[in-house]
């Protein structure tokens, strides 16, 4: 497996800083965040993120994205796009930029599950994804669907229904360990086996559930918050063991949204932990190192 970082999780750094620091720490790849975002007084994950490339004017930035990535020695693990499946013009732009960069694969965003009747949303999105897959085939790239809470594909089962019958060379699924703690959790190995050739990419972060105030009748309201890789509820070792057992040997992309450690310490520790966990998991899965 090879390890990369999604730059949504590195908001304090410029693209040049992100590429240089991640390469110096030993990461092998980078997944650039591409979206138009709101300004913010301080850099944040979702607004004012300095390591984000704007969608507006993306075509003009492609040479600079390529240069920064190439000169750092990092590879593209993919492109973190936010164009929704029904935004055909911007999906096409993202696919074209991915092809020009040689980045191979790009995320296409799913509609929220609360944005309409689920059955109608699902049927319409199936048509949109079929269209995106056809365009990706023309360009020699792959459109990716992420398992994400509060969207129409929170689970492997839902994503499989969406892509089943489409060409897995040009449409695939991002399995996301942390998101599934919030919604959509299924046994990892079973999920990988269900997805089969559609398992194209992996995101790793961690989450914990936190008890809120207890109401007068004794009801406890819970909420989730991002946690460090080491402290969240998802079992990273077991996850890697399932990936090994399935035979996955592709990219594993970190997107840690916890803030307990300073950013540079956080990314350094994440790489150390992911490598340690991946090595430990080999014995769990009965896999011999090569």
Image: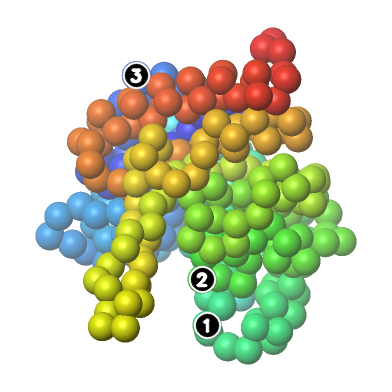
Question: Mark 3 highlights which residue?
Answer: 24
Q: Alpha-carbon distance for marks 2 and 1? A: 7 Å
Question: Mark 2 highlights which residue?
Answer: 150
Binning the other alpha carbons within 10 Å of mark 1 as few (below 14), some (14 to 19) or many (20 upward) gives few
Label 2 with label 1: CB-CB less than 8 Å: yes
Left or right: residue 225 compared with residue 114: left
Q: Alpha-carbon distance for marks 3 and 1? A: 42 Å
Above or below, 189 against 167 in this view is above
Measured as percent of width and height from the top left, residue 14 is found at: 26, 40
Examine the image and state in which quarter residue 148 appears.
bottom right
Q: How many callouts does the rendering have? A: 3
Q: Say which quadrant the N terminus sits in.
A: top right
Question: Mark 1 highlights which residue?
Answer: 114
Residue at the far top: name it: 290
Measured as percent of width and height from the top left, residue 284 is found at: 65, 24
Element at badge 1? loop
Examine the image and state in which quarter residue 271 appears.
top left
Residue at the far right: name it: 165
Camera-side residue: 266 or 220?
220
Binning the other alpha carbons within 10 Å of mark 3 as few (below 14), some (14 to 19) or many (20 upward) gives some
Measured as percent of width and height from the top left, residue 25 is found at: 35, 20
Left or right: residue 197 compared with residue 223: right
- Which mark is drawn over residue 228? none
- Sequence order check: which comes first, mark 2 or mark 3? 3
Question: Viewer-nearest of labels 2 and 3?
Answer: 2
Label 2 with label 3: CB-CB less than 8 Å: no
């Amino acid at each position: 497996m090879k390890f990369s970082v999604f730059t949504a999780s590195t908001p304090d750094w410029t693209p040049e800083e992100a590429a240089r620091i991640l390469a110096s720490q030993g990461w092998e790849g980078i997944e650039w965040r591409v979206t138009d975002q709101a300004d913010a007084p301080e850099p944040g994950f979702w607004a004012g993120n300095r390591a984000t490339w704007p969608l507006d004017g993306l075509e003009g930035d492609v040479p600079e994205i390529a240069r920064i990535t190439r000169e750092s020695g990092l590879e593209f693990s993919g492109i973190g796009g936010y164009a929704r499946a029904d935004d055909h013009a911007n999906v096409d732009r993202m696919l074209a930029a991915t092809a020009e960069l040689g980045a191979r694969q790009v995320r296409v965003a799913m509609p929220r599950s609360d944005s309409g009747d689920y059955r109608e949303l699902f049927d319409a999105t199936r048509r949109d994804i079929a269209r995106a897959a056809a365009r990706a085939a023309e360009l020699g790239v792959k459109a990716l669907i992420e398992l994400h809470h509060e969207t129409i594909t929170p689970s492997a089962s839902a994503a499989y229904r969406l892509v089943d019958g489409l060409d897995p060379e040009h449409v695939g699924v991002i399995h996301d360990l942390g998101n599934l703690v919030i919604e959509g959790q299924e046994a990892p190995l079973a999920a990988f086996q269900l997805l089969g050739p559609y398992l194209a990419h992996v995101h790793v972060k961690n989450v914990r559930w936190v008890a809120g105030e207890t109401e007068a009748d004794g009801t406890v309201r819970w909420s989730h918050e991002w946690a460090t890789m080491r402290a969240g509820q998802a079992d990273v070792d077991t996850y890697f063991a399932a990936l090994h057992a399935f035979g996955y040997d592709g990219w594993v992309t970190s997107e840690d949204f916890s803030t307990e450690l300073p950013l540079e310490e956080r990314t350094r520790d994440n790489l150390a932990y992911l490598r340690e966990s991946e090595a430990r998991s080999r014995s769990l899965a009965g896999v011999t190192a090569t």
